[in-house]
Amino acid sequence: MYLTKNEKKMLDGEEGYAVKKSMEILVALGNIYGADRLVEIGSVQVAGVSYHNLGDAGLEFLNELAKDGKVKVLTTLNPAGMDLEDWRNLGIDPEFARKQNLVIEAFSKMGILISCTCTPYLIGNLPRYGEHIAWSESSAVTFANSVIGAKTNREGGPSALAAAFVGKTPCYGLHLDENRVPDTHVEVKADLSKFSDWGALGYCIGKTVQNKIPYITGIDVVSLDELKSFCASVVTFGSKPLFYMKDITPTSEKHQPPKEKITIEDNDIKKAYEAINDDTEDVDFVCIGCPHASIKEIAKIADLLKGRKIVAGTELWVATSRPMKQLADKRGYTEVIEKAGGKFACDTCMAVAPLKGRFRTVATTSAKGCYYSRHNLMMTKMGSLEECIEAGVTGKWR
Amino acid sequence: MEVKGRIISKGVAEGEALTTNMPISFYGGVDPETSEIIEKGHELQGKQIKGKILVFPNGKGSTVGSYTLYRLKKGGVAPAGIINSDCETVVAVGAIISEIPCVDEIDISKIETGDTVRIENGVVKIET
């Protein structure tokens, strides 16, 4: 891989330990994946923030990097393992909170924004069309590549950090247009009237196309929140963080539907629900916001919860970013939701909080949320927001 | 025997080979305290990787696995060196941040458990 004079100096350690280590990582990855050079990036999203996933090893390495490492571009952070302000309200262990705060301190020292959300594009880290970025967090990577038309590989936590310290990333994979050509035509003939149907659709497409890039036709109308949910699901059950949706996502008009074709029908969506939903009625946990709830979703939750009460023995969490919560506070949504017994889980989410063993069954609108809840040994129920709120109020799935 | 590969993480290491044809997931698959492979059904399950030249096709699993290698190193129980057929992100990043010599593009079928192996940057010397 070609390196400029300046990049060679960084590799030789002229800018200190963090930059040197970062350059070693970027050069190794560039060589492995056949990059010919580094490319400048507009922003970074760093995953691997929850102490639950990092452990002491991760914390130790972050502290090492924080000694002299400062990010060179706009860098935002994925959700942490807890609400950074109100962690007690979510039943987080104080020792976990102490360790999580040390992780956050290290990131803060590096100059990273403590945004703690998987939806950086909703709170001020919005790349432009065609911009090279280095993001981790698969749902955000898929959103950035597909809905916005920015260019990023699916980075891991450490490689995203390395890119932030250098301000560049190796130019391979989805940074190159020749690797962004759709190779499977997916025709959607299914009814997608329920919000959670988009998670089910992501399940169907992800499982089927795996590492291929789908070109999706048959969708006339889709909201941003639905796209957000679809992005999270399609990359959780598949692996390629890029799709095209005809007349909806950028450059879809430049591509022809590929010859290889699959069709998604009502029966496929039904089967996805059957695979995701466990056979159980009792619900003791309702979690909305995977990916993090938008202000529109929060408004709808408040509307559905007005004058009602979450039943004893069941918890309802709204996982969102701090800025969304602040908007909700001002609009009165927070008061309505909390009065009904619901809790806000800012800065964190159901995928990365230490939830193992805390709940038996979760109800959620999110297919990705169900996938990670099973890792936390919960049974799962996926449905519309109305169905989830109903489960919170009655403790039963109907 | 001497074979040439590609340097992923530079350095010199020597030790006894521990070889598997199965990919290794460091996050969840290796105990970071003892260095024991704990993945159920793995052919190296129960074996400790401490001080070995660990020979396997490639890494797999969560990118947090890079930090597991770092923790093994800090705890003094890391492998002495790593040889892969096709190195991927998790192992590459882990080896670099932990300063464990690592080389790939090696035909790993030539190295058997118990062989004495020396990694000298991109060159691997095998004594059977």
Image (tube, coloured by chain):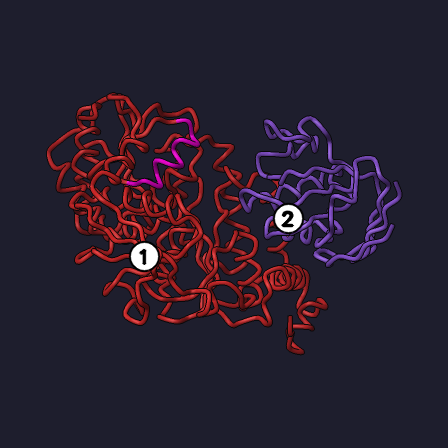
Decide which of A48, B9 is in the foreground and name it: B9
Residue B104 screen position, x and y as percent: 71, 53
Callout 1 amino acid:
His
Identify the residue position indicated by label 2 in the image.
B91
Task: Please tell me in which quadrant of the rendered image residue A185 appears.
Answer: bottom left
Residue B103 screen position, x and y as percent: 73, 53
Image point 20% across, 56% down: which residue?
A: A219
In the displayed structure, A87 sits above or below A63; it is above
Image point 54% across, 58% down: which residue?
A: A110
Left or right relative to B121: residue A393? left
Q: Is residue A68 visible?
A: no
Q: Which residues are magenta?
A: A366-377
Separation (CA) of disc 2 from disc 1: 34 Å
Identify the residue position indicated by label 1 in the image.
A185
User: Chain in red?
Assistant: A
The quadrant the N terminus of chain A occupies is bottom right
Residue A369 painted magenta: yes
Image point 47% across, 67% down: which residue?
A: A175
Chain ID of residue with mark 2: B
Image point 29% across, 30% down: which residue?
A: A277
For label 2, the crowd category at 10 Å Cα-Cα, with few meaning under 14, some 14 to 19 and many 20 or more, is many
Name the residue at the front extreme: A259
